[in-house]
Amino acid sequence: MNAQKRHEIFARLQAENPHPTTELNWSTPFELLAAVLLSAQATDVGVNKATAKLYPVANTPQAIIDLGIDELKRHIKTIGLFNTKAENLMKTCHLLVNQHGGEVPQTRKALEALPGVGRKTANVILNTAFGQPTIAVDTHIFRVSNRTGIAKGKDVVEVEQKLLRHVPKAFKQDAHHWLILHGRYTCIARKPRCGSCIIEDLCDYKEKTELG
């Protein structure tokens, strides 16, 4: 895929959705961090239901520490793997209070040192909370990048590096959100909805469907 085609793909995605963002509900960097930690193998809708109950009670690291592990688990028990997630979130809260003054750090190294935070989560926080042009590659973005030909790679790190190299600078800040939404609602895993896809004519995928 050439640079002109990539530019046109992102121009169309931008025209359709000029201000994309995460579907997780958050109002502070810590709320976003907590929501992303809770979102592994869970839907954004499910996480939002849990945080809608949790955040009015506790939405800072110190407040969650004060809430205690048992009450934290009770608030998020509707989410899969809630026991492990509660433990990780509590450990993260202690680290944030003890090492970062209760604030979410703005560097990849410091973020990845937090329990349950890997490269993908760090990229989401850096991009969405702090406006850095990082691209977090999840299963949707990995699929869309390979299927369309925008950035082919054997693993998420290779796809991330190719996206950072090939996505035009003007679109880099929002590329993560456009690609994840495209993968979630149009370029879905089993039968992509090529019939209603706004970049169908630019896509390299050989097995296009008529589905709308």
Image (spheres, helix red, strand yellow):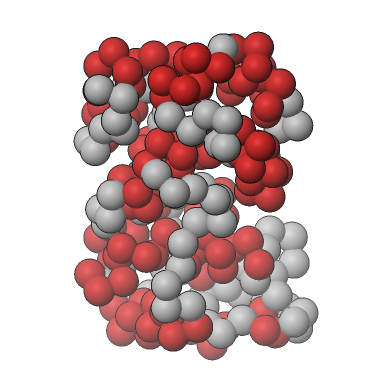
Horizontal arrangement in the rendering, residue 70 relative to residue 134 (left or right): right
x then y, percent, for residue 155: 45, 43
> Can you give x and y, in whole percent of width and height, for residue 187 in the image?
63, 68
Residue 45 seen in this snapshot: yes
- Quarter of the rendering containing residue 106: top left
Q: Nearer the viewer, residue 28 or 43?
A: 28
Question: In the displayed structure, does residue 56 sit left or right of residue 112?
Answer: right
At 56% across and 85% down in the image, what residue appears? 198
**In the picture shown, does residue 70 fall above or below 36?**
above
Q: How far across and how far down the image is residue 48, in percent?
A: 63, 46
Residue 50, given in percent of the width and then of the height, sits at: 67, 37
Name the residue located 56 percent from the left edge and 64 percent from the top edge. Answer: 181
Front residue of this view, candidates 145 and 181:
181
* 4 to the left or right of 68: left
Q: Residue at x 67, y 28 (%)?
A: 76
Displayed quadrant of residue 91: top left
What residue is rendered at 55% in x and 50% in y?
A: 24
Which quarter of the rendering shows the N terminus?
A: bottom left
Position of 9 relative to 184 (above/below): below
